[in-house]
Amino acid sequence: MRKNLFITGASTGIGAATARLAAAAGWNVAIGYRSSKDAAEAVAAEVEAAGGTALLVPGDVSDTDLIPSLFDKAGELGPLHGFVNNAGIVAPTSRVEEFTPERVREVFDVNVIGAIMCAREAVRRMSTKHGGPGGSIVNISSAAAYIGSPNQYVDYAASKAAIDTFTKGLALEVGQDGLRVNAVRPGLIETQIHTKGGEPDRLERLAHMVPMGRSGSAGETAEGILWLLSDKSSYVTGTTLDVTGGR
């Protein structure tokens, strides 16, 4: 019997790659997205082609009042066994002295507050304490959390450092409630986030800094996420997995 998975930010990049890989591994997938409906529909078609049931879940995780309804919609698949807390944004490259409160607030509204409130809803639905089946939550952090991203987006890096700490704390809190909570820190990965940050050439410019000498793919990141979702990682919680090529 297929298990049910909800992924936020699943229309492109790492979220989309995770949805495709999950479907091939036997999951049904609720595909969260904010505005890229066509891309989300394309991912849904791939999920269904792999034998899974796909469900589109539109919504913005920065609207905390909306988050419970997103999980209600995802729950139409059935009880959730997995949640990938993937939705995130980056602001254009800038130094800290040029930041505005509005910029920092927008990054933290999505990457921290939205992510924490999404995890709250996942716990309320998945935890055995609340009558759920148990399962696995995977938060998406970033290598920026320890690199710091100077001269680029220190606010984004700080938001992902918050996710690292949140992952550890939540894992300790719900460890006896049938839930495992882990995170993945992608490194220099081939996604659209670099263009959104105003650096479309970032992969080529920084690849030499990676010990493996290349950037990674969204699919390679998804492999780590799927392992943490699966029973193969049944004794792993409170851990953050680096998918960084050694950086």
Image (spheres, rainbow, N blue to C red):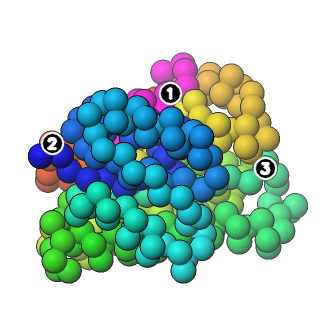
Q: Secondary structure at mark 1?
A: loop
> Looking at the image, which residue sits at the far right?
98
Residue 194, compared with residue 148, is above or below; it is above
Residue 171 position within the rendered picture, expressed as x and y whole percent measured from the top left: 28, 67
> Quadrant of the rendered structure where residue 232 is?
top left
Residue 35 in sight in this render? yes
Q: Which residue is mark 2?
A: 232
Q: Amino acid at mark 3?
A: Pro
In the image: residue 39, left or right of residue 80: right
Q: Amino acid at mark 2?
A: Lys
Which disc number belongs to residue 92? 3
Which disc number belongs to residue 182? none
Residue 244 in sight in this render? no
Tally of numbered discs: 3
Does label 3 or label 1 sit earlier along the sequence? 3
**Residue lying at 51% horizontally and 41% vertically, measured from the top left:** 41
Q: Which residue is mark 1?
A: 216
Q: Is residue 119 magenta?
A: no
**Residue lying at 62% horizontally and 22% vertically, measured from the top left:** 208
Q: Secondary structure at mark 3?
A: loop
Residue 19 position within the rendered picture, expressed as x and y whole percent measured from the top left: 39, 41
Q: Secondary structure at mark 2?
A: helix
Structural distance between the alpha carbons of marks 3 and 1: 22 Å
Q: Amino acid at mark 1?
A: Gly
In the image: residue 180, left or right of residue 90: left
Which contiguous range is marked in magenta? Answer: 212-225
